[in-house]
Image (cartoon, grey):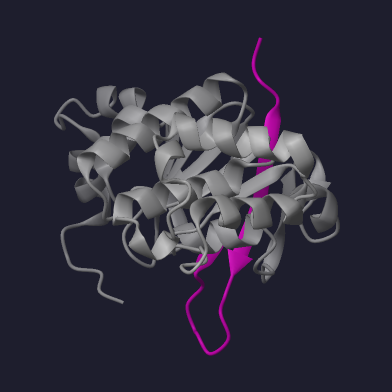
């Protein structure tokens, strides 16, 4: 039985003030529940803009987005209870310990007492950080900060998790731990929306993808099916370069 659609985007567009070209140009996407959905594209393709609109951080210029049947513009309070957001930027407090940081964030979600302590301990343990819980964030390596950044977005057990470049700039071990943990979250029912420039990672991690370029969807489907439909290309990266070109996209 097919999973129900959890996120819809209908003719979603965004043009930033002062720009003559849209960052998003009438995109339409339906994301089934319990998928790992990758938004892929060159710099400036519209990936982060899409996530920011779905999380309520940006207003679209036109079109509509819904999450679990709720309109993103009209029902943001209800939506924020069921989503988690892990931004590309490290959104942590460097002078606090990891434990103090997660307690503070947990309290913002309304988590308290023993339930919060158990949840923090569980997440730290799963991501290999429990023994470092008393250390200040500023002493952490890049990979450790990425893992704490992830925990901050999942403390409240969201049904939908948005991840913007969650493995950028980290060591292979931290990347593996993060991706393995995300796969387990997905198996337990969490829908994951993910952006990345790592095409090999996306090919192996995502169950579905959409490739964006200049704010438009130029390909969509399951990675293996997209590769099978273009036998002249051996992997997702080759297809990506074929579709988007090899010219640089410096912002």
Q: Does 179 lie within the magenta span? A: no
Q: How many marks?
A: 0
Query: Residue 50 or 9: which is nearer the viewer?
Result: 50
Residue 145 position, x and y percent, is 39, 54
Quarter holding the N terminus is top right
Query: Residue 30 or 36: which is nearer the viewer?
Result: 36
Furthest residue in direction top, as rendered: 1
The magenta region covers 1-25
Q: Quadrant of residue 226?
A: top left
- What residue is at 17 percent from the left and 41 percent from the top? 238
Quarter holding the C terminus is bottom left
Residue 12 position, x and y percent, is 63, 58
- What residue is at 30 percent from the left and 55 percent from the top? 141
Residue 122 position, x and y percent, is 56, 30
- What residue is at 34 percent from the left and 48 percent from the top? 167
Query: Residue 108 or 129: which is nearer the viewer?
Result: 129
Query: Residue 218 or 86: which is nearer the viewer?
Result: 86
Please determine whether, in this image, residue 101 is positioned above or below residue 38.
Answer: below
Q: Does 18 lie within the magenta span? A: yes
Furthest residue in direction front, as rendered: 134
**Residue 177 visible to the viewer:** yes
Q: Quadrant of residue 140?
A: bottom left
Left or right of 208: which side holds 60?
right
Residue 134 position, x and y percent, is 47, 50
Please determine whether, in this image, residue 228 is positioned above or below residue 201.
Answer: above
């Amino acid at each position: 039985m097919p999973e129900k659609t959890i996120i819809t985007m209908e003719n979603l567009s965004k043009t930033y003030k002062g720009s003559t070209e849209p960052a998003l140009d009438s995109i339409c996407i339906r994301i089934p529940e319990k998928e790992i959905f990758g938004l892929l594209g060159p710099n400036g393709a519209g990936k982060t803009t899409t996530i920011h609109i779905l999380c309520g951080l940006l207003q679209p210029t036109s079109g509509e987005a819904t999450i679990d049947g709720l309109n993103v513009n009209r029902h943001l309070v209800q939506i924020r209870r069921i989503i988690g957001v892990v931004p590309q930027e490290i959104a942590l407090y460097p002078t606090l310990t990891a434990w103090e940081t997660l307690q503070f964030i947990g309290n913002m979600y309304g988590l308290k007492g023993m339930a919060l302590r158990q949840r923090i301990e569980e997440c730290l343990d799963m991501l290999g950080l429990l023994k470092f819980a008393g250390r200040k964030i500023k002493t952490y390596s890049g990979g450790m900060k990425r893992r704490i950044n992830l925990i901050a977005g999942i403390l409240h057990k969201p049904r939908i998790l948005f991840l913007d470049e969650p493995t950028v700039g980290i060591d292979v071990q931290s990347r593996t731990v993060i991706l393995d943990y995300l796969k387990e979250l997905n198996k337990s029912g969490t829908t994951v929306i993910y952006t990345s420039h790592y095409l090999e990672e996306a090919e192996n991690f995502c169950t579905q993808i959409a490739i964006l370029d200049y704010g438009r969807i130029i390909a969509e489907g399951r990675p293996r099916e997209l590769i099978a439909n273009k036998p002249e290309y051996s992997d997702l990266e080759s297809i990506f370069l074929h579709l988007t070109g090899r010219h640089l996209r410096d912002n």
